[in-house]
Amino acid sequence: MNDQPGSAALPPAKNGGGRERLMLTISVILSATAFLFDRPADILAGLIRTLSEPGILITDTMAIAGPGAAFLNSGLLLAAGLLIVRMNRVTLSGPVMAALFTLAGFSFFGKNLYNSWAVPIGVLLYAKYQREPFARYILPAMFGTALGPLTSQISFGLGLPPWAGIPLGNLAGVAAGFVLPPLANHFLRFHQGYNLYNIGFTCGILGMFFMGVLRAFGFDAGPVLIVSKGLNLPLAEFLYLFSIGLAIAGLFFGNVGFAQLFRLWRRPGRLVSDFIASDGFGVTLVNMGLLGILATSYVLVVGGELNGPLLGGIFTIIGFGAFGKHPLNTIPILAGVFLAATLHVFDTHSTPALLAALFGTTLAPLAGAYGWPVGVIAGFLHMSMVMNIGYLHGGMNLYNNGFSGGFIAATLVPLLEAARERKERDLT
Amino acid sequence: MKNARHKSEHVLQELVAYAHRHGMNDLNIHLACSTQGFDIDLEGDVSCRPDDLDALKQALNAPRQLELEGYYYELLGSSRDGREFQLIGAMVEHAEVTCEQGCLRIHVRGR
């Protein structure tokens, strides 16, 4: 039973050891993979280079610092996230796993060892202000690193001298982190939990405010698209091996069979759907592995070229395989985005279109709750919306798809509910 | 006190939605809030044992999770489905669910 006090001493985390060891192993794998791509000296030089990059959307860490540095950046940030989780005695539940995978994934495009601290520090200050334990706000703190480019852009991207840019950038990050928890909580009601990347929506709103102020003072940043090339084969090999490894690891945690897997796949996936709590860790890992294979295959089948941002997108999907996503609610979204990209002016295999597809799965709960046709429509609308909305925050919110997804879900859900109410009235 | 009141409203909303979904139209509800937290008792007649009763029991008795409570509690009561068992379980310290002789009783205690 439950015995946790609200703000006093925290109980020991119930991670069963296995989950923590697995995440630590993933951190080591990511760090070790770095040395398969580059020499140690190049990795170190690349890692140092990432620190002073603005990192706004879409900047591929592999392109600016090399794949080795990008992998080490990801492994180190995952380890840091894991350490924070452990220090605060937080259980490695579905949402926490999703947050850690998202942190690792976005370390391939935008998050780095410099810009990922200001927002969590702001959240920590908010926790102190509320006289609550930081554990209560650990999810906004970790997901909130989406605003890392806010810190980096002001520090290094606006042409300010370092003595002014660095303090101002960090101050902006801390301020954003301080207001993030109440806003994130509030905006949940806007889309009623049908947009899995809720912090993406919240950070989009915040980024919009910050960018508005910056533009008012004459600071602006044009669209950025820096992506690496020529890494398709090694990244595909890595992703397939990683995903298969996760699924096999799931089998070792037990209680995995087709019945358990199909039970999980029948869940709508609306927030809050912690698959680890409802279905067990083993079957959740299998689901995560299968999602990794599905997402990687989608990119390759439509003729895309794997790079840092796409690797980040696939890692995020894998992470949310513990918190709302499964193949049955994800495929309709991918189909909708693909359909839109086919009819629109965008290339289906371009990096922005593929990112829209991968991160468009933030709307997976719509397909899970209302059926696959709704999922296809949501994916279609998402593709149109997401390509227009990035201007508002000037690329400072890395979860641009969560921003777009919030609007799509908030628009569709009331209409779908009205239709459902009418249908139910007809039946009674 | 204010915090406990606010949370209890969300939890109660979700429990009532659950009861309505199972055809419980005549409900007895007792809600008590104090500086220590809140207690909710809800009971009503059901025509048959709810098929998701075991899932409800299991979720309500899950360990409390501060990180879910702090971030997601606004979602409670936001839909009319009454399926946010996991979230209530993450927020409450103690729960009892019984269904005997056509009467469903739910008691939760949180802070």
Image: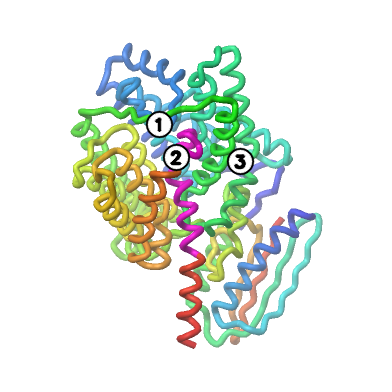
Residue A350 in the image, given as x and y percentages of width and height: 26, 39
* Badge 3 or badge 1: first in the primary sequence: 3
In the rendered view, does A10 fall on the left or right side of A278? right
Q: Is A246 displayed left or right of B70 in the figure?
A: left
Type of amino acid at the residue the image marks with label 1: Pro
Q: Amino acid at mark 3?
A: Leu
Q: Are marks 1 and 2 in contact (CB under 8 Å)?
A: yes
User: Label 1 neighbourhood size at 10 Å, few (<14), some (14-19), many (20+)?
Assistant: few
Q: Which residue in the protein does label 1 denote?
A: A223
Regarding mark 2 in the picture, which secondary structure is present there? helix
Q: Quadrant of residue A265?
A: bottom left
Q: State the quadrant of the N terminus of chain A.
A: bottom right
Determine which residue is flagged by label 3.
A180
From the image, state whether disc 2 or disc 3 is nearer to you. 2
Vertical placement of residue A250 versus B47, above or below: above
Label 2 vs label 3: CA separation? 19 Å
